[in-house]
Image: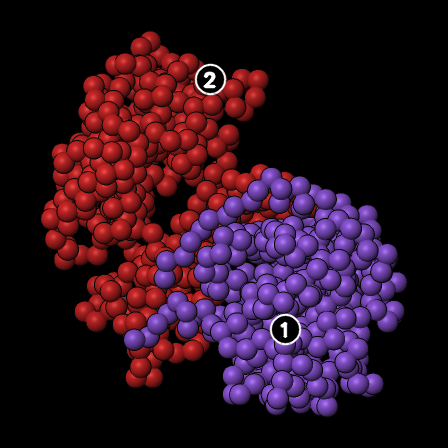
Amino acid sequence: MSAVSELEEFRNEVASWLSEHRPPEPDFLLPESFMEVGTDAQFAYLRDWQHKVYEAGYLGMAWPKEYGGRGRPQVFQDIVNAEMAKQKVPFVPNTIGLNWAGPLILAIGTEADKHRYIPGILSAGDIWCQGFSEPDHGSDLANCQTRAVRDGDEYVVTGSKIWTSLGTYAKYMILLARTSPDASSRYAGLSYFLAPMDAAGVEVRPIRKLTGEYGFTQTFFNEARIPASCLMGQEGDGWKIAMMTLTFERGASGGQAGGLAGMAVTVADVVELARTTMRDGRPAIEDPLVRDQLMQFLIEEQGDRLCAVRARIPALCSERPMAIALSGKLRGTEHRRRLNQFAISLQGANGARWVGDADVVAGGKWQRSYFNAFSATIGGGTSQIQANIIGERVLGLPKD
Amino acid sequence: MRLHTSIDFTDEQSMLLDTASNFFRDRSPVATVRTQLSTDSGYDDAMWREMVALGWTGLAVPVEHGGSGLTLAEAVTIAEPMGRALCASPLLSSQLFAQGLVAGGSEAQRFDYLGLVCGGTPATVALFEADGNWDLEQIRCRADIDHGRVRLSGTKTLVNDAAVAELIMVSMMADGAPALVIVKRSELPTGACGRETVIDETRRSFHLNLDGIRVADDRLIVGDAAQLALTAIRDGALLLLSAEAAGGIAGVLDLTVDYLNTRTAFGRKIGSYQALKHTCAEILIGLERARSHLYHSASLVAAGEDSEAALRMAKAESSSAFAFAADRAVQFHGGFGFTYECDAQLYLRRALWLQYAFGDAAHHRRHLARLLLPTV
């Protein structure tokens, strides 16, 4: 059989498995990404779904067999991911494990680490969270104040991490902490841990979001004792490993276990909404003003897709090589926020309803999605900071 | 609503872009642009001859007619830096004439005229009329055919470079359908061609009274060929004007950033104020999206694929981003920005001219909705 027909056959197999086994619609509104999992029912539903996808052989397809993967070429996983997105099945929730911590452990972890952590990441038996951001420092990672002090064969951890997604459900955290406060630079004193969340002295406090839901936690370390074997690499390697994690997070280096990580809202979804909502007694899609606005959003969305393509052609980026990369977050997150805002406006008077109302459009997902969109325009450096970065680092304007 | 996302950019295109960028930076600094604002032709003929010698007039013309046999994607690499330098030349007008001929001209017509265009004979297209309609098929000018002779009537407006063009391709209604007719400069009666005043002072625009002009019917392009020619002209215009606009955004962004890094107010460089800095970031985003749309649509045109949606997006994005960038450039130059001496007005005039040439952003969004949002 030729390689092409083998892949085509695989695509058909995945497609029919997904349509046969997709879980029934729950009677509650699902979250749209791992950052928005706010109730036990949502978590259980998504964890069970990941387990089912993994059992069917469709997660970690390119990871080594000895740790629970399938040892196949990456292209098979890519096909699964694309089919999951196409069929709009629920996402798999262990995102940090599958896509950030897992590839990191496979890249630089010990043999024992790999046997210990990888199978649980894939099956959703062990949920992972990330402990990078701290309450007073936003996304200034190098300013990390959480302390880890070596004491025999343990580290004693003191401090606090914030915006911990899945914090309530996680068994492990990838944790950045300061081991040498007197090191030569702010970067040199940091270390990286695969920390157990059930250690004594770790306290998880859910944060209630603007939507009224829970979905993030603040994690407190009150002289929590974790085994010294949790240290990744050497003391002082923390910054380097954190940066490596970010390259996995941003998809810049491959190796992710795959699976759909979230429900991306696109202009095409809003077009579908405009077909079903009414304006002046006619479908909103027929309203010239709505059509004009939809096309404005589409031109932006397509422009951003094309920017990602052009960024790979150096001759078309020679003047300001970082312009596309450094503007990507601002472009994408602000577009998404405004697109959600617009989607609410298509609902006429029903735009005033909220999640839980019997007559709210689509369960209130657009209203909630608009509110949740702020997590991306604020988290990871606010849009205003992004605009400063573009002004200063791309255009060469003076600092404040 | 599936849209392609390919961008192809060859080494040859990259070299052309470098060459043209250097050429226009050296030969068309803004002081030189200003010296041409009040001349009759609006451009420097010696520079035009150099552009011809570099082969730029024949890039998208088949080899058998004296061109390089490349595509409009190569012409984009000239038009973008030309727009950045606000440089005036009959290049775009001539290219649109050539594209109409390549797509719809008879073998004899192509043989007769394409070689001239490659050799630097200025040519242009006459498409628009007094009502300002952008729809190229809504034509009032008439061509009445009688025993091998064609009698023209009506008036065209906003014809670029008509005073220097030796060849003009004019859209007409012939037997109730759109047609094109090629008119030579020598066939225009005295006084048929009159100068118009347009917002962009680097441009030369004319109205053209066709009454009483008679040409042989071998000058006509009719039927499907006329449709093909009109589509090729529209596509070429959207692509090359988007290229000029993308170049213009880059040019006016440079002007603005330089000023923000120089001018001090209240003891600080004004570029350190976020109200200005953040707006510059917004302008940059417009530039990046515009260039991405531009080179994507150039790739589709070069490959001969359906490019209508991509071209309309490119024109909408680039011309509105340019208009925004130039508007802010005037504002950010403060009192100086209000003067004729400040170069920001040159870009603002160019941006508005481009916005209203071949359809503004709202016009193209309406057509995009027709293409991409069927309601049945």
The image shows residue B166 at horizontal and vertical percentages of 77, 71
Is residue A347 toward the left or the right of residue A239 in the image? left
* Count of numbered labels shown in the rendering: 2
- Tag 2 subunit: A
SS at mark 1?
A: helix
Q: Amino acid at mark 2?
A: Gly
The image shows residue B259 at horizontal and vertical percentages of 77, 53
Instruction: Tell me the residue at 41%/57% (across/down).
Output: B3
Quarter of image, res B246: bottom right
Q: B205 above or below A153?
A: below
Q: B15 above or below A107?
A: below
Residue annotated with mark 1:
B356
Q: Quadrant of the C terminus of chain B?
A: bottom left
Is residue A178 toward the left or the right of residue B204 in the image? left
Is residue B263 toward the left or the right of residue B170 in the image? right
Colour of chain A in the image: red
Colour of chain B in the image: purple
The image shows residue B261 at horizontal and vertical percentages of 75, 48
Camera-nearest residue between A249 and A181: A249
Camera-nearest residue between B225 and A6: B225
Residue annotated with mark 2:
A236
Q: Amino acid at mark 1?
A: Tyr
- Tag 1 subunit: B
Instruction: Tell me the residue at 34%/64% (across/down).
Output: A270
Q: Quadrant of the N terminus of chain B?
A: bottom left
Camera-nearest residue between A337 and A10: A10
Is residue B143 toward the left or the right of residue B368 in the image? right
Q: Are marks 2 and 1 on the same chain?
A: no
Camera-nearest residue between B327 and A139: B327
Q: B39 above or below B301?
A: below
SS at mark 2?
A: loop
Give the residue at the far front of this rendering. Answer: B147
